[in-house]
Amino acid sequence: MKLQTKKIIAREGLVIIACLICSAISFFIGSAIPYQSPTYRYSVLLGGHKHILTFLDDNPSGFSDEDKKDIIKSLKEKFPTKFSNESNFNPDDLTIKYLGTKYSLKQHIKNAGFNFGIIFLIVAYPIYLFIRFILWAIRTLKQKER
């Protein structure tokens, strides 16, 4: 085997190893961050007052009357000036609208680490080869015929 061929194989091997190491570091960063469950945000309208409530548990099936009574009770305790103690609200008076799921910054970084690791593992080397091919083609086309 020629020395030039050995150099090409060595360079390609080092590029593949570098891609694997970068992907492994990204996966490690993603797995080192502890999981933090998201919060689910709801807009609650009661007695003409609008509040944003966050829950740790998702409630896709909706809120039962017992849940609504608990929410009304907690709103009265949290905002005693807005709701007088003698005002009685029925669960039907409570309007709840789902606003969305909120993830913490840690969870975003964790997800980005995993996603970057997967993308880097799958896409980095083919992109490197594509760029090298373009550069080789440009150099080849610029060379004068001998």
Image (spheres, rainbow, N blue to C red):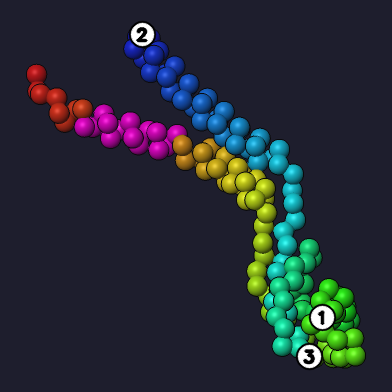
- Residue picked out by circle 1: 81
Which stretch appears magenta?
Answer: 125-138
Q: Please state the horizontal and vertical placement of residue 125, each as a whole percent of the image.
A: 45, 34
Q: CA distance from mark 1 to mark 2?
A: 84 Å
Q: Is residue 62 visible?
A: yes
Task: Give the residue at x 9% y 18%.
Answer: 146
Task: Tell me the residue that label 3 is attached to.
Answer: 93
| Residue ID for mark 2 | 3
- Asked whether the residues under the numbered discs 3 and 2 touch, taking CB atoms below 8 Å apart as contact, a structural biologist would say no
The kind of residue tagged 1 is: Thr
Q: Name the image quarter holding residue 32.
A: top right
For label 1, the SS is loop
Q: What is the secondary structure assignment of the residue under circle 2? A: helix
The crowd level at tag 3 (other Cα within 10 Å; few <14, some 14-19, many 20+) is some
Q: Amino acid at mark 3?
A: Asp
Front disc: 3 or 2: 3
Counting the numbered discs, the total is 3
